[in-house]
Image: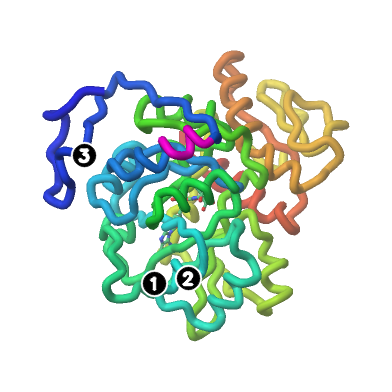
Amino acid sequence: MAGGGAEPLPALVNPCVYIARMPEDQPETLLPDDNGLARAAVLLGQGHVLALPTETVYGLAADARSDMACARVFRAKGRPRFNPLIVHLQDIAGAEALAEVCSTARDLARAFWPGPLTLVLPLKAGHGLSPLATAGLDTVAIRVPSHPVARAVLALFGGPVVAPSANPFGRVSPTTADHVRQGLGGAPAAILDAGPCAVGLESTILAPGLSGIRLLREGGLPSEVVEAMTGPLIPDTAPGTVQAPGQLAGHYAPAVPVVMDSDLSEHAAVRIGFTADQAADLHLSQSGNLAEAAARLFDVLHRAESLALARNEPAIHVAPVPKTGLGRAINDRLRRAAAMRH
Ligand code: TXA
Ligand code: MG
């Protein structure tokens, strides 16, 4: 690392604390032990961004109260500034300090936090978050992760942490530390490596409101599980009213065109089967287990991309995946990957 000169410092930041990173710097690899967790909290406090494991995907974590730290997240991902970030907290009490938590939101939080659920809630006055975290909106997306490493870092740091998925904007999300290294290179100051993520799909995003609960993104908490408690969710599919960029067509895309619902008869392609008994190059699960397929989806897409580039194949073909439970979010991600224009 080298000091000074690389970028202007916002007035909010104490220049004695901030140490600029140079493009050639490589991320430190941190282990999820006492030293690694403590180092992660120190780096967050110094305004750095670091890749952090959560139960869904690896996140690119930074201090949600710091303009400079949030700006560095947008720059590292190449993400447009109008896309707000998710704020990660330790518990419901933390959410109540930042946002108006209505009774529906509280019921959802009690049922599914910690876990793969994000709630979009109205901001409270004096919330203290950087306007970059919320993209200047009057709402904030909040998630309480269940991964013990993410929780330990949140506890040591003691403040709100933004963490979008730790991938370049629009590309396949990372479920291992290697995916982060391949995608973001030296952009994060450190990568806290705790192995593969168990859920493998980003959180489900819900926006409770007066007219019901809007489903902004299918994710690691199947919508049927929520609906069993709340009744029907309101699908947020009206064209032109994109609430979450994760809902954009052409998101989650490998560098090679993706064809979904394929019968895998095309041989000039990298082929991904749903179950191990299908003739294919890669498989999402052994015996058709959707939780296993969800956990493996992004890793299989990363591998298929490398294979296609190495073999000079023009496409990635994916067999049909059932459209229930976690299969909803799997199909959602495949649909968006397939919509990418190359
Ligand atoms: O599982 C996850 O949610 C992961 C892990 C790291 O926690 N994070 C994640 O973040 O997927 P990201 O930035 O890739 O996706 C956040 C989504 C975006 O689509 C964004 O538009 C939406 O949340 N979002 C954030 N704030 C919002 C708001 N106030 N209203 C509507 N959507 C919002
Ligand atoms: Mg993302």
**Residue that badge 3 annotates:** 17
Q: Could you tell me the amino acid type at mark 3? A: Val
Q: Residue 220: give x, y in percent of width and height.
A: 64, 54
Q: Is mark 2 within 8 Å of ligand 1?
A: no
Q: Residue 236: give x, y in percent of width and height.
A: 52, 68
Q: Residue at x 48, y 31 (%)?
A: 180
* Residue bounds of the magenta highlight: 34-39
Neighbour class for label 3 at 10 Å: few (<14), some, many (≥20)? few
147, 168: nearer the viewer: 147
Q: How far, Cα to Cα, is label 2 from label 1?
A: 6 Å
Query: Are discs 3 and 1 less than 8 Å apart at CB?
Result: no
Q: Could you tell me the amino acid type at mark 1? A: Ala
| Residue 236 visible in the shown view | no
Q: Is mark 3 within 8 Å of ligand 1?
A: no
Callout 2: SS = helix
Farthest residue, direction front: 34
Q: Which mark is residue 93?
A: 2
Q: Residue 2: give x, y in percent of width and height.
A: 21, 23
Looking at the image, is 213 positioned above or below residue 73?
A: below
20, 305: nearer the viewer: 20
Query: Are discs 2 and 1 less than 8 Å apart at CB?
Result: yes
Q: How far, Cα to Cα, is label 3 from label 1?
A: 27 Å
Q: Which mark is residue 97?
A: 1
Looking at the image, is 285 positioned above or below residue 228?
A: above
Q: Could you tell me the amino acid type at mark 2? A: Ala
Q: Residue at x 51, y 84 (%)?
A: 211
- Which image quarter: residue 185? top left
Q: Is mark 1 within 8 Å of ligand 1?
A: no
65, 285: nearer the viewer: 65
Find out whether residue 38 is within the magenta segment. yes
> Which label's residue is closer to the chain start, 3 or 1?
3
